[in-house]
Image (spheres, grey):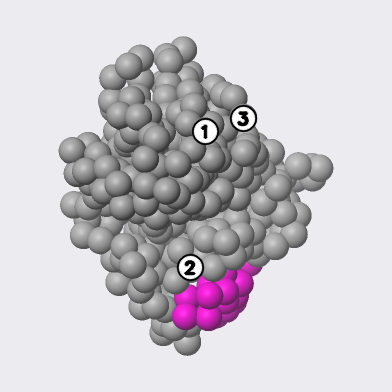
Amino acid sequence: MKYDVIVIGAGASGMLAAINAAENGANVLLLEKMNSEGRKMLISGKGRCNITNTAYQSEYFKKIFPKGKFLKHAFSTFFTKDIINLLENKGLKTKEERGGRVFPESNSAADVVNTLRIILKEKNVTIKKDSKAEDIKTKDGKVIGIKISGKKEIILCDNVILCTGGKSYPATGSTGDGYALAKKLGHTINPVRPALVPVITEGDTAEKLQGLSLKNVNASVWINGKKRKDEFGEMMFAHFGLTGPIILTLSRTVVDALINKNEVEISIDLKPALDEKKLDARLQRELSNNGKKQIKNIMKNLLPSKMIPVILDMTEINADKECHQITSKERKRLKNILKDFRFKISGYRSFNEAIITAGGVETNEIDSKTMMSKLIKNLYFAGEIIDLDAETGGYNFQIAFSTGWLAGKSCVKLFE
């Protein structure tokens, strides 16, 4: 049988591409190498699925790398309200949380995937699971079909949309297969590396603090002694190093710097609301008001209890020392570490723990108005396979939805 459109990969971008192509009258085959659709969506947002973000497009472009403006047309075709309406029209209620993050009201990622499954069924999309695309067949520079691993015959089609994702969370099926398929057809694959990934620190300080979360702190990345980027918000210590929202956001800068053999440090300002002068005044006040108390007891006014022995040890202050005995040098050391709690970064975690993948198919080889390859006619790209990645907060799913929708729409227009 010949199909108008074959979509490879039933993730966020693949399901949207299949839905829109079918909606526009195409006979669509959706191929998935795993035994179910949307596996990565199911684990996203700690099982809640951060569907999108209500930020303006201008804000999106600041949070997408390396060339956010490539998505201008895709976003103008299908954006935040469109994905929310698509889901809500099928009965899935959504809610907006702080920072513009949109989640299903039920807090269940499975509800998002099931709603998309329902739409796929309504649009008569044929879904073939446990089917890995091994090769994309072309003739005279144009797509003519695909070959499935372990099968002899070629499935003929007029269009292929490649939505195989990146390499992050490989257990969900995203193991980088699409890069090999695209490379075989002549596409440039920019170096892929983990993005939105926890970082590994030297020494055992993070390990001593593992499990501790900090809110309202400022973390900054220092490369070869120069401050490059900073983020305010939440973070967490792990047995290997640092993680949590602001660390994940900074990780892109960290990973690229480490790949280029630079020296990388992360500095945490534990008291960003106070400048050094105000913090020093606060410390003096605490010490003079509690002269007879041990320093370890008054530190509870400044830090979570788990941090106190670690900080006092690092500043070489005896925890049992009474406040009136604290010298000005010790107070200065305390002030400095509260404003600059510094970690040397030695590495980053693997694709198994990375939320997304940086790198991928070079955007210069894709028509941003259609998502079609500039090298192979009727071959389209959507989602994480493209060299585009964003910060946390729903931006990456919106990239997948928008590019998938545009690719689905474009190939049917061409087919007509």
Residue behind mark 1: 318
Magenta span: chief secondary structure: helix
Residue numbers of the magenta segment: 104-126
Do callouts 1 and 3 mark residues in contact (Cβ within 8 Å)?
no
Between 129 and 137, the one lying in front of the other is 129
CA separation, marks 1 and 3?
20 Å
Magenta stretch: includes residue 113: yes
The correct choice, above or below, for 248 with respect to 27 in the image is: above
- The label on residue 204 is 3
Magenta stretch: includes residue 21: no
Work out whether mark 1 precedes mark 2 in sequence or the reverse, and give the earlier one: 2
Q: Which amino acid does label 1 sit on?
A: Asn
Residue 118 left/right relative to 33: left
Q: Which amino acid does label 2 sit on?
A: Ile
Q: Which amino acid does label 3 sit on?
A: Asp
Residue behind mark 2: 19
CA separation, marks 3 and 2?
50 Å
Q: Tag 2's secondary structure?
A: helix
